[in-house]
Image (tube, rainbow, N blue to C red):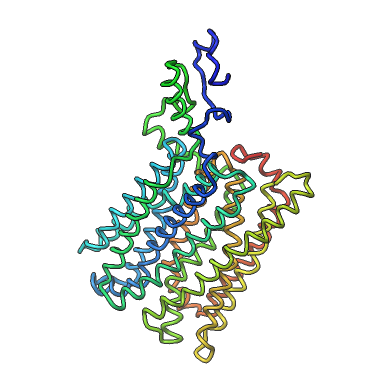
Amino acid sequence: MADIENKPEKEDIEIGYEVTFDGLNDKEDATQLSTLRKWLIVVIISLGSTCITCLSSCWTLASTNIINHFGVSEEVSVLGISLFIIAVGCGGVFLAPMSEYYGRKKTYTIGLFLCGTFNLLPGFCENFGGVLFGRFVSGFFASSFMAVASGTFADIFPKDKLAYPVALYTMSPFVGPGLGPLMSGFINKYIDFRWTFHVMTIWCAVIVVMVVLFVPETYQPVLLMAKAKRVRKETGDDRYYAPLEKSKRSLVQAILLSCERPIGLLFRDKMTFVLCFYTGFNLAIVYMFFVAVPYIFETVYGFEIDHVGLTFIGLILGMAISSLVGPFFVTKYMNKKAAANKGIMEPEFRFFSIEIGVFIAPMGLLVMGWTAYPHVHWMGPIIGMFIFGFGIIFIFNGIFGYTVDAYRLYAASAMATNSLVRSIMGGVFPLFGKQMYKKMGIHWASTFLALIGCLLIPVAFLFAKHGPRLRQQSKYAWA
């Protein structure tokens, strides 16, 4: 491989001339964007993720009006939450790896546009089957933001600068689920429940416009295609090429291959399987809150629908504050560990964040469960939600950061795998969550979830110790 400023030798002409980003003539290289532009990209993508997760949960407090309007049972109504969440995970398996072939920007733009388009069905359709279909398809295309975002951050930020972008993004898709019921509570108290979905469609449209105007393509193989095209035009030599241009895949082949890598990561990589289950369990509890929290505050404290929505402020604040303070302490610890490791930053240093969160999150569940008495102030369970939200952000920051760092080349596929597992678990738990709280009681149901969380505590410590060896054994990890 030679520099593009030099003409290829005679023997090179026969085989072509591959272009690279060599630091000399790299107008297309996304890593050269200004810091301000990079953070603008992070903010827009994070707002998109907040929109998607808010869309997933806004159904929660619209459910009573939906039941009355369509004449369906409470169990059937919960499908409006579950189908959307499961579709987000399934869609990521297709859309995230395809972004590694066709580019991030197209995946974002087309995916969110179709998400908003199919969200019109819940807003206008008079058939409940059509409403559920709209929810599922909308969630499928929404996954473009949820699964591809971390890959974009890995494209534009160096390894040692990933902590804060990942922290902001980690906060956004978890603040969204708390924001959804908060918004939905007021809409459904004072205006027609259809506006729950109209507002979300407008939000989707705004994010699509922002992506089109301000978010460039960031995936290096696609950018190399743009550079190769420019160099061919400048030199008049058609033998300059980018590696992706040599691919002979059809669209069908690309889709099949896009499915293979996330599934392979799930079943052939031990760390991915366990970490996906861990994130799935914690997200499942968050989505179980959408049926459990209204039950707790309506039965124990007699809250009305708009007041129930306000109780999710505890969860939102816990996540937001954790996202702000967590990266500071974790980054300080990681830098100290790197200094002691001859300046080498190991991905396993990110497990420190998980080692903090695994103790805090179960504590929040216990506080939430055992303060839910009529004679105890209603702030008790909200404080429990705050503590739980504070803890799980530490967990997700550690797992997301480790996934992007350890599986750097396949970051989007690895995050799609994680999204698939956590979305399936997050979609299933609401189907039995309210029944569990009714049968076991508010106190013991929360305790049961906390005990499962305690059983998972050793995972972070074991992986922190044995992670380097496991990465060496993986054909996907960045060893």
Q: Give how far across and how far down residue 435 sits, in percent.
A: 43, 74
| Horizontal side of residue 301 vs 80, given as left or right | right
Q: Give how far across and how far down residue 401 sits, in percent.
A: 60, 51
Determine the image quadrant of residue 75.
Answer: bottom left
Q: Is residue 234 above or below residue 125?
A: above
| Horizontal side of residue 401 vs 438, given as left or right | right
Query: Which residue is at 52% across, 83% downward?
Result: 379
Query: Which residue is at 72% across, 57% downward?
Result: 333
Query: Which residue is at 57% across, 50% downward?
Result: 273
Residue 266 visible in the current orientation: no
Q: Is residue 397 above or below residue 467?
A: below
| Horizontal side of residue 350 vs 232, given as left or right | right
Q: Is residue 193 above or below residue 417?
A: below
Residue 286 visible in the current orientation: yes
- In the rendered image, the residue lying farthest to the bottom is 375
- In the rendered image, the residue lying farthest to the top is 10
Image quadrant holding the C terminus, namely: top right
Which of the two residues, 338 or 387, is positioned nearer the viewer here? 338
Q: Give how far across and how far down residue 233 sits, in percent.
A: 41, 21
How many labels, in total? 0
- In the rendered image, the residue lying farthest to the left is 126
Query: Which residue is at 53% across, 41% downward?
Result: 155
Which of the two residues, 8 or 300, is positioned nearer the viewer here? 8
Q: Give how far across and how far down residue 478 sits, in percent.
A: 63, 40
Image quadrant holding the N terminus, namely: top right
